[in-house]
Image (spheres, rainbow, N blue to C red):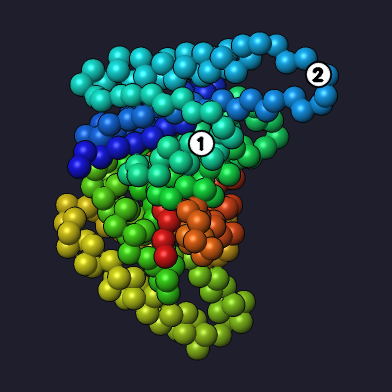
C-alpha cells in the first residue's frame, strides 16, 4: 500500500511550516498527502436567539478554501505528488486525529490561528496528539539549515520496538545520522568525590551502553547505511534532551498508548517537556 501523510492546515504561520514539513516527509517516503481542515459550529441554544442562515455553509466554504490553498501549495512544490484535501465538521482535534487514523504520519503545527502567544504548545495540537493513533510530528523550533541529525530519546529499560523502527527508518529516509541518547542522573558519583564511586560510574555507563547496543543492533542490521551514534549522558533527562534539540533536525520520543480501549497516547513528563520546549520538530511514536 502507498504510504500516506495527513497534515492539519489552517493557513497560520505555524500551519505553513507544518505543510512544508509534510511535503518533505512525503517526498522522502514517496507518500500521498491529505491536507485537513476542520470547522466547528456550535449552534446557539438560547431560546429566541437569532442564528443567521448560511453560517455553517460559510464556515465550510472557508475551510474548503484553506484546504485548497494547502493542496495547491504542495502540488506547486511537488508536481508529481498525490495531494488531496479533507474538510471535516466537528471539534478540530477530534476531526484531525480521526482523519489520520490509518496514516503513516500525522504532521501538526505548534500553534494554530486561535492560539495565544503565551502558550508553549497550542491546546488543539496537544489534544490532537493525545487522540492520535500513529506517529505524530509537532513542527516547532527555530528554522535553520539542516544538520542531518536525528535524535532518539531511548529508555534502555523500556525501549519499545515501534520507537526504534521509526527512528532508524526516518534517519535512513533523510540520509541523516541517528544519535540515540539515554540520560541518567549519575552526578551522585562526582558529588561524593570518591575514586571507588567514580569507577562505579564508569561501569554503570559501560553497562548502559552495552545494553543499548544489544537493543539497537538488530535494527542497525536492517539499516546498515545509517550512521549510528550512541550517547549515555548525565543530568536531568528533560533538560539534556531539550538542549540537544538546538542542533538536531528532529527528536523522536515515545508515548504509551491509552489503556482504556480508546485510540490515543499518554505523553510522559519527558515527552511533554520536549513538546513545549524543543528547538526542533518533535515526533511522538505510540507504543505498547
- Residue 83 visible within the image: yes
Identified at 56% across, 85% down, the residue is 194
161 versus 176 height, above or below: below
Distance, label 1 to label 2, CA atoms, is 28 Å
Q: With 288 as the anchor, is 121 left or right in this view?
A: right
Few, some or many C-alpha atoms within 10 Å of disc 2 (few <14, some 14-19, many ≥20)? few
Residue 49 has which mark?
Answer: 2
Residue at the extreme bottom: 196
Q: Position of residue 288 (x, y in %)?
A: 42, 65
| Residue underneath mark 1 | 95
Q: Nearer the viewer, residue 238 or 247?
A: 238
Residue 228 has which mark?
Answer: none
Q: Nearer the viewer, residue 246 or 75?
A: 75
Identified at 34% across, 42% down, the residue is 103
Q: How many numbered marks have been drawn onto this rendered protein structure?
A: 2
Q: Position of residue 184 (x, y in %)?
A: 50, 70
Identified at 83% across, 24% down, the residue is 47
Q: Position of residue 270 (x, y in %)?
A: 55, 58
Identified at 43% across, 50% down, the residue is 133
Amino acid at each position: 500500500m502507498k504510504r500516506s501523510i495527513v497534515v492539519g492546515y489552517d493557513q497560520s504561520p505555524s500551519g505553513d511550516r507544518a505543510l512544508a514539513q509534510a511535503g518533505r516527509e512525503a517526498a522522502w517516503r514517496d507518500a500521498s498527502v491529505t491536507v485537513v481542515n476542520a470547522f466547528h459550529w456550535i449552534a446557539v441554544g438560547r431560546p429566541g436567539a437569532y442564528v443567521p442562515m448560511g453560517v455553517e455553509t460559510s464556515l465550510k466554504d472557508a475551510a474548503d478554501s484553506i484546504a485548497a490553498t494547502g493542496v495547491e501549495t504542495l502540488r506547486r512544490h511537488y508536481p508529481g505528488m498525490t495531494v488531496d484535501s479533507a474538510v471535516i465538521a466537528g471539534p478540530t482535534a477530534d476531526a484531525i486525529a480521526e482523519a489520520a487514523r490509518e496514516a503513516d504520519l500525522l504532521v501538526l503545527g505548534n500553534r494554530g490561528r486561535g492560539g495565544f502567544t503565551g502558550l508553549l504548545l497550542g491546546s488543539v495540537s496537544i489534544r490532537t496528539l493525545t487522540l492520535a493513533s500513529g506517529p505524530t510530528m509537532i513542527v516547532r523550533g527555530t528554522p535553520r539549515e539542516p544538520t542531518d541529525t536525528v535524535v532518539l530519546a531511548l529508555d534502555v529499560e523500556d525501549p519499545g520496538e515501534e520507537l526504534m523502527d521509526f527512528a532508524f527508518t526516518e534517519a535512513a529516509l533523510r540520509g541523516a545520522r541517528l544519535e540515540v541518547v539515554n540520560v541518567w542522573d549519575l552526578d551522585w558519583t562526582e558529588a561524593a568525590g570518591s575514586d571507588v564511586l567514580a569507577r562505579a560510574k564508569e561501569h554503570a555507563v559501560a553497562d548502559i551502553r552495552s545494553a543499548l547496543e544489544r537493543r539497537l543492533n538488530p535494527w542497525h542490521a536492517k539499516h546498515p547505511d545509517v550512521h549510528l551514534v550512541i550517547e549515555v549522558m548525565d543530568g536531568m533527562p528533560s533538560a539534556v534532551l531539550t538542549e540537544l534539540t538546538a542542533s538536531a533536525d528532529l527528536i523522536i520520543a515515545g508515548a504509551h498508548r491509552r489503556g482504556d480501549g480508546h485510540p490515543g497516547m499518554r505523553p510522559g513528563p519527558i515527552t511533554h517537556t520536549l513538546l513545549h520546549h524543543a528547538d526542533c520538530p518533535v515526533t511522538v511514536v505510540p507504543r505498547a
